[in-house]
Image (spheres, rainbow, N blue to C red):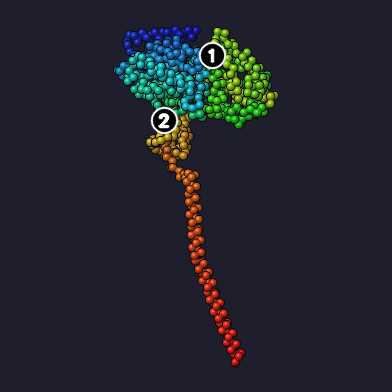
Amino acid sequence: MKKVFACILSFIIAFTALLSLQRGQDVNAAITGVFEASGTCVEYYYSDSLFAQDSSSYSTPLADISLIASVATESRETAKSFYGELGFSNIEFNDGYDNTTDSDKIGVMVASKKININGTEKDLVVMGVRGINYGIEWADNFNVGKTGNHQGFDNNSKRAFEFIKNYINNHSIDKENVKIWIQGYSRAGAISYMSARSIVEEKLVKSQNDLYVYTFNAPSGVVDEWECTCIFNLVNCMDVVNRTAPSKWGFKKYGKIVYLGDPAKVMSLKNPNINSTEPLYYEDFTVRNLDLQSALGQGGIFGGEADQQYNVIKFYSNFYDFMSNDSLSDSVNTSREKHGLEPIPAISDRETYVDYYQEAFMYFFELTYSGAIDAESSAMGAFSTILGADTMSTFLAECFEEDQMYPDTIASIKSSIVIDSSSSFQLDETKLLPLLRLIGKAFRTDSGASSMIGLAFAKCEMMATLFGNVAYIASAHFPDVVLAWIRYDDSDPYYETNVEFKSELKGDLPTINGESVMKKNFLSVVNCEYDEEKWIFNGWYDENGTLLSSDPYYSFTVTKDVCVYADFEEAPEPTVIENEEIAETKETEITEKIKSDKKKSSSSNDFVIPVIIGIAGFCSLVAGIAAVVVVMNLKKNKKKDQS
């Protein structure tokens, strides 16, 4: 009954708003209504005056309507209806909206309208990037690539940019007198902020002041820096999607981060979906264990609770460490080692991920969202039989003792997946091997059990906790939750934290991070990364030149708008002598020493020899005189005797 009433109310409000627009021709009139799509039914507010403000200032009303607009891109029909109610026309869609067989694509719609800003008529162009209901496109989220920006996002952001550029050119829209509004949820958020850079650099707008970009729970997709003031990325602190691709691989987002959500207040939020009785979150996040004993009881295979307890945010960090750490016990590699096979490495970096796991991740989601799977089957269900505790040990042994796919395993998978007879989609058996490797690597044990019996009772905390809390983790990504945080009844305003260099620097600059927008008393963090051989970090300073911290990682409580300055100076050039120069120097020193020693030796001989000769001559003279005296005495004595 409530749903019927909401829809009737939506029609009345929208109809009244359209009549008022036609009578008064006031393009700045506020438009209100009720939006219903994807299980969400919420009231909304829109006004052209939202684009009269500077795009560098965060706007809660603009964030609110941007989120609803991003959900409206779920289909052509919903987008036409919603944007039409806001007064947009000339709505166009790219080919990605209808392509359901290729994962490397993006759905984009563009529309436009005339608005009046301070007495000046302008064109407002909106680009909505579809971030939900995109089927097999899900697989492209895992197309990371070995270098540069996220490959899947980068390729499709270029397609989105080309589409809006052609739209503006085809409709002869004046680039000096246009404002562009872009929003995107989840995957579409990354496409949005990446395409925004091309829009600015290719001068589709006069300046960044004319570009308004709002994203929601967007993953990270860029590795370089770009100074921008027009992008706001709203993220739920407990959402896992906004934490990918991993920051440890160098990924980040363009623009400022608007942090939403205080886990301590999560259950006090009112669900914005007025027809829903479901909570925004489940009440607890419980550490689970893969436990055969639990499976035989009432808890299910992932029902056993481990001794350690931690919240979802800590779990994300621990799970990443688990998947990227090879020091943990690994029954898969233990089995492979016994058969003389190379170990399967952990997902420690981009190159390893691409070489061993990227194809597996992508194929899993191609199976899941291809649309070819029978309604009574699913890709997850396809592996349910081989992921059961009673067959886990056999499955791992069968898949990893040798580098081939065993007939029993393939038969089990193929029999579990029911392909729609009308679909051209076929199972690719060559892609099943990396998929099986991925599953085996993910289900390695934390406890070191490697025997077939021990494995069935092994501690497998990370994967069990993931699957045991899937509903909780998924709910943190829902648009309803983001909208609830945006609309959260809090009188405290949002404050901005900005980071800048204290003085002008040249060359390969250090990286400074900390652009964010958040509520009062939230904890803001700024940090910097730099080459210690090139730079010396002197600390973080405030606008008055007062030292705030000497630690590259500085956190503080937000109480006002603030700019934090990073002070660096160039490190002195180290005195380095190349090896050849050192050898040459040593050789020269040795040669000079030899010469010096010879000279000293020669000088000593020149002095000693004459002295010896002189002494010898003197001795000879004395001896001669003595001999003469002796002879004379003998003669004298002889004469005396004769006389």
Find the residue positioned furthest to the right: 453
- Does any portion of residue 118 appear in the rendered image? yes
Residue pointed to by mark 1: 370
Whole-percent x, y for residue 382 in the image:
60, 15
- The reply, left or right, for residue 534 in relation to residue 316 is left
Looking at the picture, tell me which residue is in the foreground, 339 or 27. Answer: 339
Q: Amino acid at mark 2?
A: Asn
Residue pointed to by mark 2: 498
Residue 453 lies in what quarter of the image? Answer: top right
Label at residue 193: none
Q: Residue at x 44, y 20 (%)?
A: 157
Q: Residue at x 50, y 7 (%)?
A: 1
- The reply, left or right, for residue 23 in relation to residue 332 is left
> Which-is-in-front pick, marks 1 and 2?
1
Q: Earlier in the sequence, mark 1 or mark 2?
A: 1
Q: Secondary structure at mark 2?
A: strand
Residue 173 lies in what quarter of the image? Answer: top left
Find the residue positioned furthest to the left: 119
Q: Are marks 1 and 2 in contact (CB under 8 Å)?
A: no
Q: Secondary structure at mark 1?
A: loop
Local crowd at mark 1 within 10 Å, few (<14), some, or many (≥20)?
many
Q: Amino acid at mark 1?
A: Ser
Compared to residue 312, the image places residue 599 above or below, namely below
Q: Residue at x 52, y 15 (%)?
A: 136
Looking at the picture, tell me which residue is in the foreground, 393 or 469. Answer: 393
Q: Residue at x 61, y 28 (%)?
A: 343
